[in-house]
Structures are given as C-alpha cells and as structure tokens.
Image: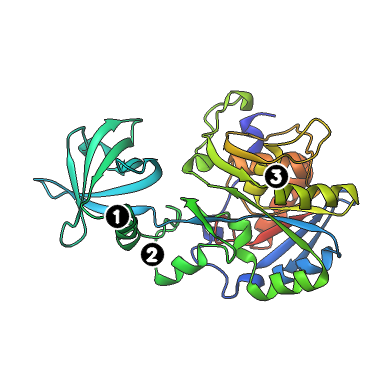
Amino acid sequence: MKLSNFNFNLPEELLAEFPAENRDESRLMVINRKAGTIEHKLFKDVIDYFEEGDVMVLNNTKVFPARLYGNKEKTGARIEVFLLRELNAEQRLWDVLVDPARKIRIGNKLYFGDDDSLVAEVIDNTTSRGRTLRFLYDGSYEEFRSKLTELGETPIPKYITREVTPEDEERYQTIYATEEGAVAAPTAGLHFSKHLLKRLEIKGVEFAKVTLHIGLGTFNPVEVEDLSKHKMDSEELIISEEACEIVNKAKERKSKICAVGTTSMRALESSVSSNRTLNPYTGWTNKFIFPPYDFSIADCMITNFHMPKSTLLMMISAFCGHDLMMEAYKEAIKEGYKFYSYGDAMLII
C-alpha cells in the first residue's frame, strides 16, 4: 500500500466546526466487514450491537489546555506557544511548538498573562517550529500548573477557524477522561454520554481503561510514498493489570472486544504477548499500523471519519479492508457525514 492509495477529495463543508448538540446523537455509520454492508444510525444505537460480557476499551487520557498566547520581550510580538510535553517538572522545562517560529531564538523571553505573571525563556531549538522553554515562576509546582491551566486554551484542532468557546472545554474532552497529559482528544470517545455509558453498563458491557497520551505526532502528515518509511512520534502509554484481566477474560470467553478509537487500538496492539493476549505496560509507543496488518486483540472498533492520507485512515483501512473502507467514505461524503474531531462516528464490526 502506498500513500496515494489513501487520497480522496473531502469537501470543506464536511469538516465539523462544532460538535453535535448531544454527544450521543451524532450520526453513526455501521460497517459489517463480513457481510460488506453499510447502515446509517445514530450513535446511541451503538448499544444494539453489544451483549452482556462484551468489552469496550476506552482511552481515559485527559486533554490539558495546551495552547498559550504570549508576547515577545522588547518587540511585544504575539506568539502562540503549544505545550507538547513536560520534560522536567522540577526545572519547569517543556517541549513546545511556537508560531511564528522565525521570530523565536534561543535566549528570547516570552511573557504570558495580562500582568506578565508567567515568563518563559527559550533554551533550545528542537525542530523547525519546536523549542525547549524554561518557565520562570516563583510559586510551588502546583501553583505553576494551575497558572498554566488558567492561561491555557483548549487545543481544538487548527482546521477549526472559529474562536475557542467555553463549550469546547467540556466537549473537547471525553466524559471518562481522568489522566491529564494529552494535547488532542481521543475523539471517538467524545460521542459517549453519561446516559449511554450507564445503559451499556446495565446491559452488562464491561469497560477496560487504558491511557495513551495523544501528542501532535498522530496528526503529522505522511510525506513518503512508501509507508514503511514513515516514523510515528512516541506517545506515553499505560496499560494496567486490571485492564489486561478484563480484556483477556473476554477473549477467553469469546466475547466482543471493541477498541473505542484509533488510540485505544494502538494501545492494545503495542503490548501483545506471543499467544495474542494483552500484557500490562508502562512506557512509550510509536506503533504505526497500516495495511496489511493482523490485529491481535479487538474484533470491532469505533472511530471518527479521518482526513485523506492520515495515519488514522491507514489504520482503519487495515482493520476494515481497504476497498470496503473507501466505499464507506464515498458513501459518507455522499450522505453528508461530518469529518474529523467534532464529526460523526463509524462502528466497524
């Protein structure tokens, strides 16, 4: 499979600028791989496809307000700083992206907040837009983190051209997010409401929670025609003993295991034993899944509609089968499904 196999024309108006009014009332396309059928439902109908003892694997990572706006010393130029990851808590060192990058050099200072209550010094260049910042702040670490939260903005994707609203703080977060560390939401999970989770629970569906802190690398464009040469950025991953037990018991009794989102699927496939069970894991993963690929754990998945040539689309193709996926995407465009982070959902069984 080559990069060009994953190109298609996506009308701009199908990129969702806002989420559906109610989380569980976005649209749901259901694809049956065996039968080769495509059905059109609402997301809350997902419950009809699961039985008692089935397991849904949820990524419980929590998005932090990663986008800050500061001013450069002397010139006062407005600079966007996107926090990627904390490198050293004690020294308050962070890996960031800056925009416009050409103005930001080692030694520059940036001031944040109306009262310049937070200052950062550029101490290294990492990539063309990447920098390492040392934040200068007098308070305790807890006070520093709460200052970042206060000044930061919900990092909704760049293609959404509107201003961030207070609603985004709630809606660009799954309702089961507990472990802070992501700079982008695991978007398939955004469709679950408290009510729907409760109904699934009453039906006897179990939930296994894993943590994969999504970085911006997931969205990096693939720039090589030969997919085997593309390198994914590493992202932090935690799979607990408890999650493994829930998943492996379901596998044993031949219940359905559903990965909610591409990040949950990557988490599962990053820690598989030789007899195709799930192992506990704490560390990093740069797993890149593209066709052909033999999946070991999940036998169904929930996902959003992805951008042309994206690594996420490649994983879906590997799971769904390329021809059926392309047919489904053609149908989605014809039927006006919404794409990307705030878009509609797909269940592949």
Give percent across and percent down for residue 219.
51, 43
The amino acid at mark 3 is Ile
Relative horizontal placement of residue 4, taking residue 72 as reference (left or right): right
Mark 2: which secondary structure? loop
Give percent across and percent down for residue 211.
59, 49
Q: Nearer the viewer, mark 1 or mark 3?
A: 1
Asked if the residue under mark 3 is in contact with the one under mark 2, i.e. CB atoms within 8 Å, the reply is no
Task: In the rendered view, tell whether residue 22 sits above or below residue 38.
Answer: below
Residue bearing the label numbered 1: 144
Q: Say whether disc 1 or disc 3 marks the residue closer to the N-terminus.
A: 1
Please give the name of the residue rendered at 21% of the width and 32% of the height, measured from the top-left corner.
106
Give percent across and percent down for residue 331.
72, 56
Residue bearing the label numbered 3: 316
Asked if the residue under mark 3 is in contact with the one under mark 1, i.e. CB atoms within 8 Å, the reply is no
The amino acid at mark 2 is Val
Q: Which quarter of the image is occupied by the N terminus?
A: top right
Q: Residues within 10 Å of mark 1 (few under 14, many from 20)?
A: some
Q: Say whether disc 2 or disc 3 marks the residue closer to the N-terminus.
A: 2
Q: Quadrant of residue 194?
A: bottom right
Residue bearing the label numbered 2: 164
The coloring applied to the image is rainbow
Relative horizontal placement of residue 204, taking residue 282 as reference (left or right): right
**Residue at mark 1 to residue at mark 3: CA–CA distance:** 40 Å
Could you tell me if residue 338 is visible in this image? yes
Please give the name of the residue rendered at 60% of the width and 75% of the height, measured from the top-left corner.
22
Task: In the rendered view, tell whether residue 224 sits above or below residue 101.
Answer: above
Q: Quadrant of residue 143?
A: bottom left
Task: In the rendered view, tell whether residue 140 sits above or below residue 23.
Answer: above
Could you tell me if residue 7 is visible in this image? no
Q: Residues within 10 Å of mark 3 (few under 14, many from 20)?
A: many
Asked if the residue under mark 2 is in contact with the one under mark 1, i.e. CB atoms within 8 Å, the reply is no
